[in-house]
Image (cartoon, helix red, strand yellow):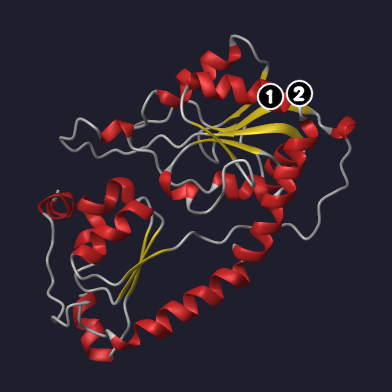
Amino acid sequence: VIRDLKQKYDLTIVLVAGDDEFKFSWISSSYATIADVVLSTDYVSIDRYCQSGVNAHFFPYPVYIPDELPPRTEDDLGYGVSIVGSAHKKGESRSRWEFIQFLEKEIDVSLFLNYGTDDPRYLSRDAMYSVFHNSVINLNFTGICSYFRPDDPLFERIRTMKLRPFEIAAAGGLCLSEFSISLSKCFEDGVDIVFFRNKAELLEKTKYFLEHKDEGRRIADTAAHKIRTQYSAEAVANRLANIIQESQEHPGVDLYEEPHRVQVSRSLASAYIG
């Protein structure tokens, strides 16, 4: 149907492919066979697309940026280490909860855990940003979450792109994040984010920034500036317009000048048929 509409109305098809860490083979690769542009939040998948002649670009999403944040002094930091989100989610690897349990043995952690908008503990966006702004450290985890389990022994080790570090930065908070390749292409370790790769690093860096609040605040300020200049709605819209304009030389064909052909993976077909 999409192919027919594309041909009838001479459309440019832009595929916004989120969560390609687990959707690439299952969903995105099928739609990519007729897309003129693919925008993916998974840096690793870009080469996989381009290897097959797909016009693909790494494209982090824009983030909500409040008009202004209240001035903050050290006395205003109501929380030490904070986590906003969920601890156990269906289809998620165990790493997040294991990290939290490990850290809590030595560090007090403020948990703002919820499982969706129906949860009475759910935080509004303003409340969530307030937590980010008033915490010394905000933790982010990048373990993959998927209901689809391929026969891949390395699948649960995948670390994915998350919007949370962008939100934390937009709120003027310091983000201590589990490492992922995609996030490392958006933020620089020790400059506008702090990465950890294992439990020992998590504990070491948490203790360090609890004792060096000024350094953490400097990193947070640098991150906030980057978000406002590179990931605002206006900045991302301008980049999108440029990508689409540059892609007009490939309407209906791939990077090898071969015409698009509709192809669908068995997993996607079985999911729809089922």
The answer to whether one can see residue 172 in this image is no
Left or right: 28 in relation to 111: left
Q: Is mark 1 on a helix, strand or loop?
A: helix
The answer to whether one can see residue 171 in this image is yes
Check residue 208 in the rendering and tell me which mark sits there, or answer none: 1
Q: What residue type is labelled 2?
A: Glu
Near-viewer residue (83 or 1): 83
Residue 219 location in percent, x, y? 70, 44
Near-viewer residue (136 or 204): 204
What distance separates the C-alpha of mark 1 from that of mark 2? Answer: 5 Å
Near-viewer residue (204 or 67): 204
Above or below, comparing residue 258 to residue 42 in the picture: below
Left or right: 81 in relation to 56: right
Which residue is pictured at 41% across the width and 24% down the height? 95
Residue 173 location in percent, x, y? 71, 42
Q: What element carries label 2?
A: helix
Q: What residue type is labelled 1?
A: Tyr
On the image, numbered disc 2 is attached to which residue?
211
